[in-house]
Image: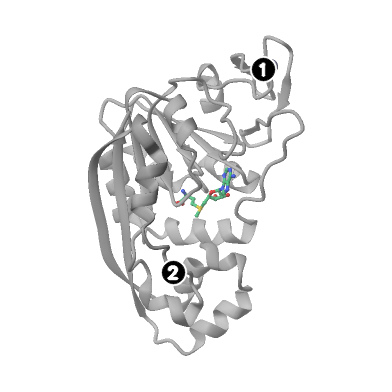
Amino acid sequence: MSDALVTAAHLLRCPHCAATLIVEPSVAVCAAGHRFDRARGGGVTLLAPGAQLPPGDAPAMLEARDAFLGAGHYGPLTAALAAAVPAATSVLVDAGAGTGQHTAGVLDAHPAALGIALDASRAATRRAARAHERLAAVACDITAPWPVADGAAGAILSVFSPRHPEEFARVLAPGGTLVIASAADDHLHEAREPLGLLGVQPEKRARLHARLGDAFTPAALEHVRFTLDLDHRALLQLAGMGPAAFHWTAEDLAAGAADLPSPFTVTVSVTVETFTR
Ligand SMILES: C[S@@+](CC[C@H](N)C(=O)[O-])C[C@H]1O[C@@H](n2cnc3c(N)ncnc32)[C@H](O)[C@@H]1O
Ligand SMILES: [Zn+2]
């Protein structure tokens, strides 16, 4: 089996000194001798001196995400992400890739592209490293400088994940495409009250544009909107993979779902916005 992290080595940079990394099966090392042991299963953790991984999503959330996305419920979103990434893209960085399922779907649609999945959760990067043979996985803090070389990416994906506009601008090659997916106002609105899901902050889009500043030009906006008829199991996976899982236990969520009809219909409503650099 090919080793995507070895293939992607020239696109990474040492988090201590920014030198290029050489990646071997069990270790990544830079010219100055900074060494980073690789995890069994393919990923590597790249952190600045003294830095720690932020908590990221808990293993139970990733389990729920894996099951829910694996059942194909968000297939139309994956397809919209794939369509938003230009055909000629050779390197795709997914910042906050989670289990890597959307990333893998986008790579399927771009047969020559190499992907790099960044995530704070080692449980996530373990899954992402297995999600696609052309996907390299790096555990890091995407709210800090990324261990990725300047101009390395032809496209960056940011799907429901923390954003770092300065790093988007540094890592994206000139002419590259930034794809940002965010929950629209009515995303999962039917499930909010019964399952205690969080509402969407107003003016999110205006704030996003303001934060991205002059480095990016809005290029396209697609609104992906469809309904899903979910049985209780799938509904609890959906609630359990999102931010509600930081506030409620699995038992709280199950109690909230108990009185709902099965199947229960929810509206998925997500904006996929592209920007060029
Ligand atoms: C809502 S999930 C989205 C995952 C994926 N993009 C998807 O749509 O399936 C957000 C992801 O961001 C990661 N994350 C949160 N804070 C982070 C940080 N500071 N650095 C890196 N990843 C982070 C979490 O671990 C989680 O996997
Ligand atoms: Zn170094």
Q: Is residue 32 above or below residue 153?
A: above
| Residue type highlighted by circle 1 | Cys
| Residue type indicated by callout 2 | Gly
Give left or right: position of 245 versus 159: right
- Looking at the image, tell me whether mark 2 or mark 1 is earlier in sequence order: 1
Question: Measured from the top left, where is residue 81 in percent x and y?
Answer: 32, 45
Q: Residue furthest top?
A: 31
- Which residue is nearer to you in this view: 223 or 68? 223
Residue tagged 1: 17
Observer-nearest of 26 and 240: 240
Query: Do the numbered discs 2 and 1 sit on residues whose CB atoms are within 8 Å?
Result: no
Q: The residue tagged with tag 2: helix, strand or loop?
A: loop
Residue 226 quadrant? bottom left
Mark 2, Cα crowd under 10 Å, few <14 / some 14-19 / many 20+, is some
Element assignment for label 1: loop
Looking at this view, is 236 or 195 the one in front? 195
**Residue 148 in the figure: left or right of residue 58:** left
What is the CA distance from the residue labelled 2 to the residue labelled 1?
Answer: 41 Å
Residue furthest bottom in the image:
259
Report the disc number at residue 199. Answer: 2
Q: Is residue 251 above or below residue 126?
A: below
Front residue of 9 and 180: 180
